[in-house]
Image (tube, helix red, strand yellow):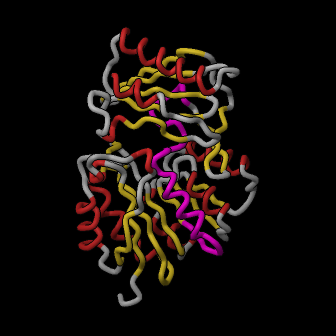
Amino acid sequence: MQSFIQALATIELGDDAVRLFHGRGGHYVGCEHLCLDWFAPVLLLTSFTPLEDTDLTLCQQAIAARWQAIRPDSQLNLVYQYRSAGETFTQLLQGEVPEPHIVSENGARFQVHLMRGQNHGLFLDMANGREWVRANARYKKVLNLFAYTCGFSVAALQGGADEVVNMDMSKGALGIGKQNHLLNGFSAGARFLGHDIFKSWGKLKKLGPYDIVVADPPSNQKGSFVATKDYVRLIRRLPELLAENGEVLLCLNAPELDTAFLRQQVAEAAPALEYIERLANPLAFMDVSEEKSLKVLRYRLSTQA
């Protein structure tokens, strides 16, 4: 707990949603279970093991002390969430959470929901992926698979994309995605398809081809996607969806599966895809083992195929 308290003394708060403390990265001995995120104007403390009351009180007191030092004239809003093996417990410790709760990232605005579920509407570790799409989408047609709340789509349209097709089984998540587009002034330019991707290849191909395809599936969600058996099914179909020199971002957030797993899947199922690079994760998510952290691999459809 001491390393968490010491790290708090150095945190600063800006306007954008960011991770402030990443114990999961293994750089803070004894605090591997703790994370602290800033979803302005709310701090979110997450623990991946149950916190004793005394430890939770220590964390709350340390956060309050730092808050008083850097924002003495503002109310502290603090949410605590415990999560493990599918179990989630969320508690408002102090202050309040705005409704709707709108946060910003690199000039984009997103709606988040901290008080329900493990997924809050915006995955902070994917910030660099969204930035890559924003920087490379100009005049492009983009396919956003497993779109969730459509962060990649907003980034693509901000970057000047001609059109984005978003597909996700969750119509609720896509509904928030539509709101995110409106928050950013995009009333046109995007499609929202609430379908099972594995049953929609014909429709996706008809709407293509695409200059950029983003695939950010859950790593292990029964009934939807299990990476160890389903990623290869997805990869196999990608070349037929891509335009000439089209690019792909393949995302994988499973600590037990490394970069080699994904690269081997591509080599065997879609050899026409040429590996370009692995995008770096935000510095806030630095990990002692990069293979356990988020993996975002960039591929291009080879003209030699």
1 and 292: which one is in front? Answer: 1
Q: State the residue lying farthest toward the top.
A: 54
- Residue at screen point 57% across, 55% down: 193
Query: Considering the image in quadrants, where does the C terminus appear?
Result: bottom left
Query: Magenta segment range?
Result: 114-142
Provide residue 52's location: percent of width, then percent of height. 33, 12
- From the viewer's perspective, is residue 37 above or below residue 165? above
Compare residues 55 and 304 and report the one nearer the observer.
55
Dividing the picture into quadrants, the one containing residue 259 is bottom left
Q: Answer whether residue 134 is magenta in the image.
A: yes
Looking at the image, is 97 positioned above or below residue 181? above
Quadrant position of the N terminus in the picture: top left
Q: Can residue 287 be seen from the camera position used here?
A: yes
Q: Residue drawn at (58%, 47%), measured in percent from left and top?
A: 174
Q: Tell me where residue 181 appears, x and y as whole percent.
A: 68, 51
**Is 260 displayed left or right of 151 in the figure?**
left
Q: Residue at x 51, y 52 (%)?
A: 127
Quadrant of res 139? bottom right
Q: Horizontal placement of 194 versus 289: left or right?
A: right
Kindly tell me whether residue 198 is visible in this rendering.
no
Q: Residue 97 placed where, x, y %?
A: 63, 24
